[in-house]
Image (cartoon, coloured by chain):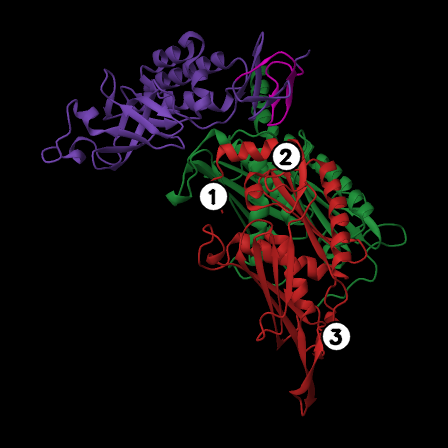
Chain colours: A red, B purple, C green
Amino acid sequence: MVSVVTRVKQKQIAQLIEEDKRLDGRDLMDYRETKIEQGIIERAEGSARVLLGKTEVVVGVKIEMGEPFPDTPNEGVLTVNAELTPIASPAFEPGPPNEDSIELARIVDRGIRESKCIDTSKLVIEPGKKVFVVFVDIYVLNHDGNLIDASALAAVNALLNTKMSNYEIKEGEVKIKPGYEQLPMKKHPITVTTVKIGNKLLVDPSLEEEEVMDARISFAIDDDNNICAIQKGGSGYFEPQQVIEAAKIAQTKAKELRKKLNW
Amino acid sequence: MPILLEKRQLVTPGDLIAEGEYIAGENTFSEKGKIYAARVGIVEYETKKIDVVALKAFYVPRTGDIVIGTIIEVGFNGWTVDINSPYIALLRASDVLSRPFKPQKDDLPQVLDAGDLVVAKVVSYDRTHDPQLTVAEPGLGKITRGQIIKITPTKIPRVIGRKGSMISMIKQETGCNIILGLNGVVLITGKTLDDEQLATRALLKIEQESHTSGLTDRITQMLKEEKAKKEENKK
Amino acid sequence: MNDKPEKLIDKKGLRLDGRKPEDLRPVKLEVGVIPNADGSAYVEHGKNKILAAVYGPREVHPKHLSLQDRTVLKCRYHMAPFSVQERKSPAPSRREVELSKMIKESLEPAVFLEYYPRTMVDVFVEVLQADGGTRCASITAAALALADSGIPMRDLVVACAAGKVDDTIVLDLMDTEDKLGAADVPVALMPNLNAITLLQMDGILTHEEFESAVNMAMEGCRKIYAIQKEALKTKYVSISEENKEEAEE
């Protein structure tokens, strides 16, 4: 994903950052305006749409029945996929998932999986044989930076919105009954991405900020303020104390958002 | 403010060599007043300038360098040449023919074909385009016979020796003509295959042991011993 | 199927393989093992056996990937089908794709990419045998292969993981500890610049535990760094030694 940010703009961003300011007027620790909608795709079992500034991500959840993994026979299966659709940016090309979309999917997956967000033990139909498989599909519709936080937020909202059909087992076959149950959830992880430009740290990078950044680091924080996933990205580096500081920033921002969302 | 390491000490990338008012020379870089090694090599310094003589490096073209290259492809109006560098060089037809190129009349593969060897000079090179070569000078042009060997370009100065002492000695002892391409490609032409192979062995030995001392003597000794053996076998 | 061990650390405080929490597995490094490559290295880290080879700088293929102002660094992390307990398909998995990107991003800060515009450097990592911590061992070997290839670097890159098993922060998790433990934190470091170029985590840790793990991992990195430097120097020192002996005869 390469697009050219002019030298002049790069300088502008760098100069502003030195004074703790950003191009769009935000403070270094401010997130852009965030809008969340749930249940926008009726055909999906669950769905959500997040607008983070101009970044737009839609997540759809589909539930199917399948076999559990051999080493976890009493747990349902979670699988996360991400599409950087060509609609979203001139830099995205059609085709099979590339390393960026695979990385995005796996980061969101880790946040959900490691925090034990979904109660997978309640997704068992027949132990060792049949379980519910939760497909989380991330669709990026407009890329203006920080796809990670937007996707993670949309994914958890979509899961909160997810309803599973009631069922019963008759004569060894699974039959759908009327009625629904919410997807059993235990935790609500929130992912916060911090970026390093010059020697300063800032949260929720816009697309232009991502293009001039040294590196980024994302932390997934659970309801008890624990860290459950971390991913550093970008061709630059962090000093050890910056990493520790970014972790604290993530915990603070996650707490703020958690309060707003009532999670 | 100190130079922290002794001369001829082996360093690896990132090793701190000196702090203070020094100049970062070959294969070093400076950051916040400190000079670090950028390649594996041996520390050398004269008063203020600190160099690392790299044990291994690839050839980056410089204008004026004499290089030996292999023709890769016959192109539209010239040739692309492999000069043992990350960059592929270009040789224009007009340069080789010493006159403007006439596409209807001139058959380029007849002049130089893929696989041919040339001794050339780099006439221009910068960060934005590939190096251009010329053969329009005396001593340059297509190579028709001899042995070609490749050695790490950083070792070429060692092969030359102080004021050319090492290379003159080898030429003398083996009776071979040796053209040293600064890109690490060397052409050896001798009277017999044995002579050429002897010179080859001497050069490869220098490449292997370039960072050690007493090398000139050892090479001289090796060449004398080999020649003595040959005389013995003749009898 | 193996029985899962109940405890990963026994009453004496020793781990499944007899190590103490702060012990590193044995590390062996060798440079210049693949003659055709421009640079190469082999690492044995615990039971991990990994080969890294570097080709380049060379012309960029395909041409449209070429960058006007710097080298393009590409990396491919791949596991051999026989490297793990259950045969793994040779086709690149999503994990291998992500790790290829992570390894590339951990090495880029160390290489002077701006020196050689319009060129490409390929880093290939093949895992011959895996036992937890392959991405760290891969980075350590790949950095050596890059230094061996003669491309200028700011520093070597070295990597090591720390984590949490049985409520204890431990260094250098092996496969079982990674699978059954509470958290795994791989870290890559440029030691002279004290710069972290890779940091990931999966599991659950408090902030304090996270800080301990990162510090422990960095200490492990510095221990391996000493072995890395020795490996680079060994290749050249042995030739001097031979000549000293010859001269003395």
Residue B209 visible somewhere in the drawing: yes
Residue C109 is situated, as x and y percent measured from the top left of the image, at 58, 35
Mark 3 belongs to chain: A
Relative to C22, B169 lies left or right:
left
- Callouts 3 and 1 on one subunit: yes
Element under disc 1:
loop
| In this view, A212 is above or below A218 | above
Residue B157 is situated, as x and y percent measured from the top left of the image, at 44, 16
Which residue has dot 1 on it?
A: A3
Q: Nearer the viewer, residue B203 or C116?
A: C116
| In this view, B74 is above or below B231 | below
Mark closer to the chain start, 3 or 1? 1
Q: CA distance from mark 2 to mark 3?
A: 48 Å
Which residue has dot 3 on it?
A: A122
Image quadrant containing the C terminus of chain B: top left
Element under disc 3:
helix
Element under disc 2:
helix
Residue C176 is situated, as x and y percent measured from the top left of the image, at 73, 57
Crowd class of label 3 (few under 14; some 14 to 19; many from 20; radius 10 Å): some
Residue at the spot x=16%, y=33% of the render? B110
> Which tag is nearer the camera, tag 1 or tag 2?
2
Q: Which numbered marker is on residue A17?
A: 2
What amino acid is at disc 1?
A: Ser
Whether the magenta-drawn stretch holds residue B6 is answered as yes
